[in-house]
Amino acid sequence: FGLHLTIGTVVFAGAAWLFGGITEDLITGDPLTLIDKLISEWFRSHATPRFTMGMQYVSALASTPAVGIQFAIMLCILLWKRLWYWLSGLVLVVAGGMFLNVVLKDLFGIARPGWADPALADPGFPSGHTMMATIIYGFVATSLILRIGSWPARFFIAIMTISLVFLVALSRMYLGAHYLSDVLAAMAAGTALVALCLTAVETLRRHRS
């Protein structure tokens, strides 16, 4: 119980600290803002129609419909297996992630890159796609890792999940929807939220047991 609580607390604290550091750099105008613009301009100048189409497919993996479908599938599985605590954790992280993303966007109001799709009128910080990818895929990966005894399988799941989230983040930058700081902050905030919710739910479950 102590190890579980310690790991959850460390992950939450580390992710929250990273998010705080990124936001501080943006507010104070540290070199991160220059790196944002350099990377965004590089993607803009090297974009090709074929690769852009591929990145649009990758980005769609964390779109609202995709997240909704994955949420529904996980909801049905957890209901079928009567894993009530994990069900509570799923609802908390997904609903909490959507709410947190809206609040942070309104709070900071940082604009997207100048060459972003005009249809994207909301602020870009943090990236909604990247945050939801971190949350939904992170939740699925955590639930699988805790139920699989094989360490190679656990390592494979972790690597695949991290790679998928990074691909979504890359696609959002490549498509001009976000800066590097937007996706990094989204991954940090998403990780912190998953750690907080799952640690709280699992702590409650073990306490009642």
Image (cartoon, helix red, strand yellow):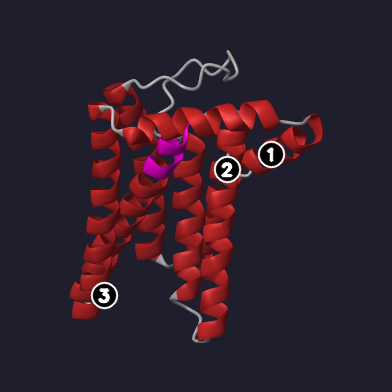
Could you say which is closer to the camera, residue 35 or residue 126?
35
* Amino acid tagged 2: Leu
Category of crowding for the residue at label 3, using alpha-carbon neighbours closer than 10 angstroms: few (below 14), some (14–19), many (at least 20): few
Could you say which is closer to the camera, residue 209 or residue 141?
141
Instruction: Residue at 41%, 47% (x, y): give it.
Output: 187
Category of crowding for the residue at label 2, using alpha-carbon neighbours closer than 10 angstroms: few (below 14), some (14–19), many (at least 20): many
Q: Position of residue 46 (x, y in %)?
A: 69, 32
Provide the secondary structure element on which disc 3 rests.
helix
- The residue wearing badge 2 is 170
Query: Considering the image in quadrants, where does the N terminus appear?
Result: bottom left
- The residue wearing badge 3 is 4
* Amino acid tagged 3: His
* Amino acid tagged 1: Met
Where, by quadrant of the figure, is residue 185 drawn?
Answer: top left
Work out whether residue 205 can be spotted.
no
Residue that extends furthest to the bottom in the rendered view of this protein: 150
Where does the magenta region start and end?
Answer: 179-185
- The residue wearing badge 1 is 55
